[in-house]
């Protein structure tokens, strides 16, 4: 996850190595936020990083 501020669903999925459907499942579960910006649905880079940190923390517990 380089210097981007936001990712499309496809970009977010590629960045973390999961399928697009997994991103949509995380959004539906409330674990990831989808934001409308300029007519596009995007995931803020900070939200994606936080979701990954939460997942890593729960896996370590």
Image (cartoon, helix red, strand yellow):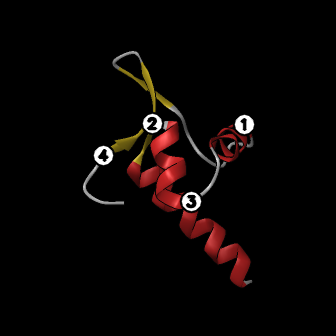
Is the residue under label 1 in contact with that under label 3 (CB below 8 Å)?
no
Residue 6, image x, y percentages: 36, 42
Residue beneath label 4, please? 5
Quadrant of the rendered image containing residue 42: top left
Disc on res. 28: 1
Q: CA distance from mark 2 to mark 4?
A: 11 Å
State whether residue 15 is above or below residue 29. below
Q: CA distance from mark 4 to mark 3?
A: 18 Å
Residue 34, image x, y percentages: 53, 34
Q: Of the two numbered discs 1 and 2 on the same chain, state the one appearing first in sequence.
A: 2
Residue beneath label 3, please? 17
Q: Of the two numbered discs 2 and 3 on the same chain, state the one appearing first in sequence.
A: 2
Q: CA distance from mark 3 to mark 1?
A: 19 Å
Quadrant containing the C terminus in the rendered view: bottom right
Q: Residue at x 42, y 22 (%)?
A: 40
Is the residue under label 1 in contact with that under label 4 (CB below 8 Å)?
no
Q: Residue placed farthest to the top in the image?
A: 39
State whether residue 28 is above or below residue 53. above
State whether residue 51 is above or below residue 31. below
Residue 13, image x, y percentages: 55, 49
Within 10 Å of the Cα at label 3, are there few (<14), some (14-19), or many (20+) other Cα atoms? few
Residue beneath label 2, please? 8
* Front disc: 4 or 3: 3
Quadrant of the rendered image containing residue 38: top left
Q: CA distance from mark 4 to mark 1?
A: 22 Å
Secondary-structure class at tag 2 = loop
Within 10 Å of the Cα at label 4, are there few (<14), some (14-19), or many (20+) other Cα atoms? few
């Amino acid at each position: 996850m380089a210097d981007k501020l936001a990712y499309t669903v496809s970009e977010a999925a590629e960045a973390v190595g999961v399928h697009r459907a997994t991103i949509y499942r995380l959004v539906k579960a409330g674990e990831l936020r989808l934001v409308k910006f300029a007519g596009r649905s995007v995931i803020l880079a900070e939200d994606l990083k936080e979701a990954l940190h939460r997942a890593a923390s729960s896996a370590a517990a």
